[in-house]
Image: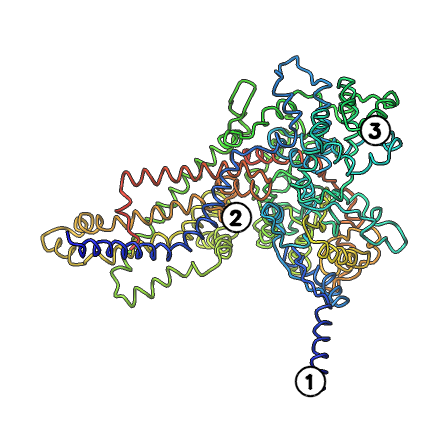
Amino acid sequence: MKRLTKLVAVTCSSLLLAGSAWAIDLTVVSWGGAYSASQVKAYHEPYMELNPDVNFIYDESAPEAVPKLRAMNEAGNLTWDLVDSIASDAIRLCDEGLAIEVDIDEMLPPAPDGTPASEDFGDLLVSDCIIPQIVYSTVAAYRTDVPEWEGRVPQDICAMFDLENFPGKRALEKRPINNMEWALLCAGVAKGDVYDVLETEEGQDLAFATLDKIKDETIWWSSAAEPRQQMADNEIKLGSSYNGRWFDLINVDGAPVEILWDAQVFDIDGWVIPVGLTPERQEAVVKFLHFATDTQRLADQAKFISYGPARMSSAPLVGKHETLGIEMGPHLPTDPDNAKNIFVYNFEWWADYRDDLDAKFQAWLAN
Amino acid sequence: MTTDQVSLRRRVKRSLRIQKLRAFLLVAPLLLFVLLSFVGPIIDMLFRSVENQLVGDTLPRTVAILRAEEIDDNWQPGDRLFAALYIDLSIAADVKNHTRVASRLNYEKAGIASLFRSTGRKIRNIGSKEYEKLFVDLDKSWSTLDYWEDLVADLERQAALPVTTTAFRQWQQDHIGRGNDVSKLDPNNAFHVILLAELLASPADVIAGLAPLHRENLSAIMAIRDQFPPIEYRESFLEFSNKWADRDVWTTIKRYSPRLTEGYFLNAVDLKKGNDGVEARPEQERLYIKIFLRTFAMSIIITLTCFILGYPVAYFLAGLPTRYANLFLILVLLPFWTSLLVRTAAWKVLLQEQGVINDTLVFIGLIDHANRLAMINNQTGTIIAMTHILLPFMILPLFSVMKTIPPSFVRAARSLGATPLTAFLRIYFPQSLPGMGAGMVLVFILAIGYYITPELVGGNNGTFISNRIAYHISSSLNWGLGAALATILLAVVVILYWTYDRMVGIDNVKLG
């Protein structure tokens, strides 16, 4: 009888212990593919090792994150805990009140030298809701084996619009963003004036007139994987895509392709915390972010994918690619050699004019 | 009639009723499921194409003033309007509704989004720091939510201070609407500005009738009223951005303030609301009618190519013995088991300029290297890829109808002297028409709503209206316009279906 009581007591207390060991499942939404894999290796796996009570559930719905979060919010049924989002989506989520505004310095650790997080991220804090992770860029690339070019090598982004010296099909994204700016730059507009010009009817006409020159020779892509495949198949000679895709094509597939870093357009990808989490879940998410966006962790991600860490203090810590063994520094968009002439994308401006110009752009495409 | 007969009739009726009820109960779960998961959301989505409560609900005071005013070429926004906007935007910015209404208005006029966003960030600077300090220095309770709650709790005080009361209540309601815990919030510091402005504008005896505590507190405020810096609403707003002087901003707010709007539908057919009623959009912005027409034209072409390719296949299958026919049917169905994206990607590899077909044609010398055919990223590509994907929907109904046509009919016609062509045209073909009708309706309706394939292989001019709907649902978040486009598409399909029914008769359509 005594033994039985003891047994019951032991069982009960161990059950209680198990119960109090507070396990939590966090649903993290990201983009899938090589990008998600780099996050899992750099952030999630090390975090789970330190915190065995946290379990991550991966969701690859980031491309539809904004409409899905809006629908979840309207239905009052939030099933996500953390969302990976590009800057323009983060701005929209913030505007719609679907993402919480974060106090970067209160939430995140400073750089190793004590610089507060907000200064460490600097200009990349384009929205009150975003916690930046990486800088990627939309950048042009070209094939190095085009006989028709007779040895000419594209020097700047205007090669994209120059059919005389660089004939052949090109690929551009099927949206006005980036294309309109590049077109204006090559129509002689100074970098600092691009958005002022683009705001006017004449400026938009000028951009379309420049794009008209290559319209018949351009394949418009909606998924960044398309130009990579087309470049690999020699279907296009020049094209725009994300720098990570070109890196893969060049270094993994060994295709005869070079990146044209001129006028690369920086974009930011970061975490947003959806509105409506319970306090416990939010606390768990913040605890994870505290870990996953510190200087070392951000630098670690560059071991797996060629995107630049968002903290300035991470840059010196970037090492070699985990499997290819290539020194990653020179392949990042933020490398000083690559960033000699960057084009700074104006998020605020596009938030205003995106729908307007998109309608005009689609009408232009359809004509 | 005997009682037996009556009770028998009653019993029969009862048992019939029970049977009916039982049958209904059996389908009830499905009916409920369809209603809840399909019909309900569709109606909700369609309603969004006219819904427009956001502007009026978020900016009620501004809208009320604008409605009473005639905005002509000489009109200028006045101080009273800016004062109303100050209250509306202070509350909206605190609740974070201002960015929502900004995105709504930005669909109609580009530039409003950043105007509202930047003003929302700075609006707290208008007077409120000094005001709050003067209030709280007099009495600490002015910084607590409880005191404000008490101030507007009483009917008498509500009647005396209507502006403050409605502002406070709206602020509370909007916070609750966003799921915020009101009890944990600090009172918005615009309340001090609003209250003093209201006191100054009211007759002096307003305070006199109040309960002692509030009478004293409000009198104390009035006693130091000269210390409050006067607020120049108009100047402050124009300092934030001179866009506030732009008449178009105000007309846009006024035009899109009613609770229901036809704006999304106008936009969906390339029209817009102008100063003198509805007008056409400028040439370079016209988009949707063209895409609608293109969607219909290409869907018809796809339906026809499916029919031309599918009819012989179905005819061939129907003539085979069953075991062979089943084998070939599997081949027809095979594409169904392959991912849509894989099939579309395969077409790219085949059709692109450096692709298999062009390479072969160049190799056998039919075309030269410089003139490779453009077969993808245009309308041709969309038609080819979609015909392939939709072909089974044509073959299967045709096949199942043809299976039921007795071969003896054609044989009889032949033996009576008909040529093979006459026998086919006059005996066989008319009997296969129901299958043809079913196949064509099925393929056409599926084609008209297709979106992923046109997006991937459509290039400049091969995309469908669904691609624009998808853009507005998932990218621009302009759900109203997306819903309007979807409603038009749905209406057109229903009308076409109805016409088809009138002309051919839906009873003559057979799926098998």
Front disc: 1 or 2: 1
Return the mark for residue A4. Answer: 1
Viewer-side residue, A122 vs A219 = A122
**What subunit carries mark 1?**
A
Q: Are marks 3 and 1 in contact (CB under 8 Å)?
A: no
Q: Is residue A179 above or below residue B30?
A: above
Which tag, 3 or 2, sits closer to the chain's start?
Answer: 3
Quadrant assignment, res A299: bottom right
User: Hey, what amino acid is under mark 2?
Assistant: Leu
Quadrant assignment, res B134: top right
- In this rendering, do the residues under marks 1 and 2 share a single chain? no
Viewer-side residue, A221 vs B203 = B203
Q: Position of residue B98 (x, y in %)?
A: 68, 34
For label 2, the SS is: helix
- In this rendering, do the residues under marks 3 and 1 share a single chain? no
- In this rendering, do the residues under marks 3 and 2 share a single chain? yes
For label 1, the SS is: helix
**What subunit carries mark 3?**
B
State the residue position of label 3.
B217
Q: Position of residue A169 (x, y in %)?
A: 58, 44
Front disc: 3 or 2: 3
User: Hey, what amino acid is under mark 3?
Assistant: Asn
Seen at 17% across and 52% down, the residue is: B420
Q: In the rendered image, which quarter contains the C terminus of chain B?
A: bottom left
State the residue position of label 2.
B456
For label 3, the SS is: helix
Q: Residues within 10 Å of mark 3 (few under 14, many from 20)?
A: some
Q: Position of residue B298 (x, y in %)?
A: 42, 41
Whether residue A295 can be seen here: yes
Q: Position of residue B499 (x, y in %)?
A: 32, 37
